[in-house]
Amino acid sequence: NNIPFIEPEAIAPPVLRLHPPRYRNISNPENKLQEEIGNIHHNEFINFWSFGSYSLHELLFYILKQTGPAHVNLSTWSISQDAIELITRKYNNGEILSIKFLLDSRVKVCKAKPLQMIAANFHHAITRIHAKVVTIENENWKISIVSSQNATTNPKIERVMIIISDEINDFDKQIIENEFRKRAIRNDRRTG
């Protein structure tokens, strides 16, 4: 038998094409996160620049205020101790129902303390990743955030998209979970 074995995740195409949802473009560097984004709506694509006003985890918290408690996947190239402390607080308060981290391997060297905090508390995997993607899901919402921002305090101008779409959330979550299955390290708490 010369037929090679193909892992199930290799069969899923890495591209998803959909008809675009309703768009909202935002680009005012003087406004704050709440003024810029306002209320989110189903089947909406919010397209904007951060102008250094907030970080990926702050955006996550803002979205969670509107969705209510949710399950989260977060992939990032870098993460700060402050971000982990805030995320842990949100998790302990029940605002985050579960969270998994897909982290770049540089965290072992450059972000040792945040990695220790993640390892002690959350399900995580380490791989070579530069994508900054957050999926947020509960009974009423399926959201993907795609950003150039990391989960760090960053005064730089960054590019962000909030996509409120079941199909895109499912697509992003599938990619993250496939990577997670290959590289998951451990689950030390009830977050899995």
Image (cartoon, rainbow, N blue to C red):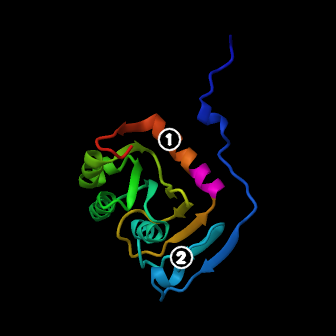
| Magenta stretch contains residue 169 | yes
3D distance between C-alphas at marks 2 and 1? 28 Å
| Element assignment for label 1 | helix
Q: Which residues are magenta?
A: 166-172
Mark 2 residue type: Trp
54 or 4, which lies in front? 54
Q: Quadrant of the C terminus?
A: top left
Name the residue that disc number 1 marks.
179
77 up-or-down from 159: above or below: above
Residue 43 placed where, x, y %? 66, 66
Residue 114, how many percent across, how many down?
A: 27, 55
Q: Quadrant of the N terminus?
A: top right
Residue drawn where x is 65% and y is 54% of the image? 167
Horizontally, is 101 left or right of 47 in the view? Answer: left
Q: Residues within 10 Å of mark 1 (few under 14, many from 20)?
A: some
Q: Residue at x 38, y 71 (%)?
A: 154
Secondary structure that dominates the magenta span: helix
Q: Which residue is mark 2?
A: 49
Which residue of the protein is positioned furthest toward the bottom in this rendering? 30
Across and down, in percent, residue 59 comes to 45, 70
Left or right of 49 on screen, residue 111: left
Of residues 43 and 50, which is closer to you in this image? 43
Q: Residue sitting at 49 percent across and 72 percent down?
A: 158
Counting labels gives 2
Residue 55 screen position, x and y as percent: 41, 70
Q: Residues within 10 Å of mark 2 (few under 14, many from 20)?
A: some
Labels 2 and 1: the sequence-earlier one: 2
Residue that extends furthest to the front in the rendered view of this protein = 139
Q: Is residue 33 above or below residue 151?
A: below
